[in-house]
Amino acid sequence: MVKRLPCHIVLVALVLCTAAVAQGPPSTNFDESKVGSYTLPDPLAFNDGQRVLSASEWMERRRPQILKVFEEDVYGRSPHPPKTLRYKVFDKDKKALGGEAIRKQVAIRLTRKKRGPVEDLLIYTPAGAPRPVPMILTLNFSGNQAVIDDPGIKLPMLWDRNTGTRERAPESSRGSDPNFEVRKVLARGYALGTIYYQQIDPDFKGGYKDGIRPLFLAPGEMEPAADEWGAIGAWAYGLSRAMDYLEKDKDIDARRVAVMGHSRLGKTALWAGALDTRFAMVIANCSGEGGASLMRRNYGETIRNLIEVFPYWFDANFQKYAGHADLLPVDAHELIALIAPRPVYVTAAEDDQWADPRGEFLACVAAGPVYRLLGAQDLGTDQMPPLNQPILHTIAYHIRTGKHAVTSFDWDQFLAFADLHFRARQ
Ligand code: GCU
């Protein structure tokens, strides 16, 4: 006789089943006892095994060694920027958002070509705030018009990642991105800068043809070489070109720009902060594998998962490490260490086990010795904090309740973190 399961058990099973499907293939490990053992590369040991003993040894000799590995084997090398920055402020409204903000939109050229691709940087500065103001700069997933309902924002062409086609964003998409809290940022005295990431490099296999990377191919090259940039590198390049412009904008304090990103764009924020030391702070929200999560931990997403679905985010060399994270000479703690001694905030969410919250925490812990060597604060603990209780040192971390997203709680913590480090520097 087939026993009928009580209704609530069926329901729980269904929920668990859906969660597992949403969180990757069945082979994915979500059991802490099955993570296995691993040894992290020591950021404070030179390639020849000698110890790094001083801040200058780190900055001048060890940091470049680690950066080189990330460039050659993970994200790929990015090209040099154009010598002259070309941009056009095509919109300025001093009474935007009912008078709360000044809105500017700037088209920034991404290559040397006079008619080459541009990115549109949308900037809100709080009306009445003492200038120059600090900024949170971030790429967005759904177009600039989606970050807030403001009829003045130019409607961009949006890529459909499933069909590889492009269409003008509809009016109805204004303010549709739930990850943004523009008014909250403005009320705390910060400017917000944002760019639609697919304007730089479309986010699907083969999409790079319509992005900026083909414009940098060497003669005879059909696609980037094995150690040349993937999409994350291209997106990070777009952030740096925004920074070139911000250095010229008198309303913004370019010495107090935090680069922030969520998920794949959190990975991008970390890489942008590692490459470009003008970013005074890095905030990586739920960045996961290929971001702040330790790749050597077999928990949640792995390198293999990443390169099976998103090979084009990284360089071709990275593919060698699918199933062999132990052979990669670096790990995520060293990506964080490349940001030292600048403040870095790594976040995780309880329901985002795919991104391995504990692996993100342990990477922050393991970056600690570099921060300490440079006279900055580490996390101050090797015990994960309880849910919703951020640790805000120079390295900051939280794991909150809820799912893979940027929530109101996250924004509150980012602004508290920025206050902590930026207000002191006014
Ligand atoms: C996928 C991917 C993650 C990534 C995320 C995102 O889940 O596996 O690595 O962070 O997409 O960017 O939304």
Image: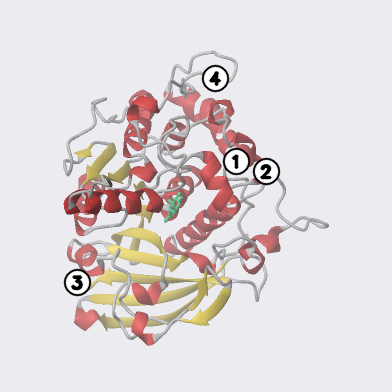
What residue is drawn where x is 29% and y is 75%? 148
Q: Residues within 10 Å of mark 4 (few under 14, many from 20)?
A: some
N-terminal of the pair, mark 2 or mark 1, is 1
Foreground: disc 3 or disc 2:
2
Q: Amino acid at mark 4?
A: Phe
How many discs appear? Answer: 4
Residue 29: x %, y % from top left: 41, 36
Q: Residue furthest top?
A: 50
Query: Mark 3 — residue?
Result: 128
Query: Mark 1 — residue?
Result: 71
Q: Amino acid at mark 3?
A: Gly
Instruction: Please indicate whether residue 278 sits to the left or right of residue 101 in the image.
Output: right
N-terminal of the pair, mark 4 or mark 2, is 4
Foreground: disc 4 or disc 2:
2
Foreground: disc 1 or disc 4:
1
N-terminal of the pair, mark 3 or mark 1, is 1
N-terminal of the pair, mark 3 or mark 4, is 4
Q: CA distance from mark 3 to mark 2?
A: 47 Å
Query: Mark 2 — residue?
Result: 227
Is ligand 1 closer than 8 angstroms to the Cβ of mark 2? no
Secondary structure at badge 3 equals loop
- Figure quadrant of residue 165: bottom right
Query: Which of 203/199 is in front?
Result: 203
N-terminal of the pair, mark 3 or mark 2, is 3
Query: Mark 4 — residue?
Result: 46
Instruction: Please indicate whether residue 181 sits to the left or right of residue 369 in the image.
Output: left
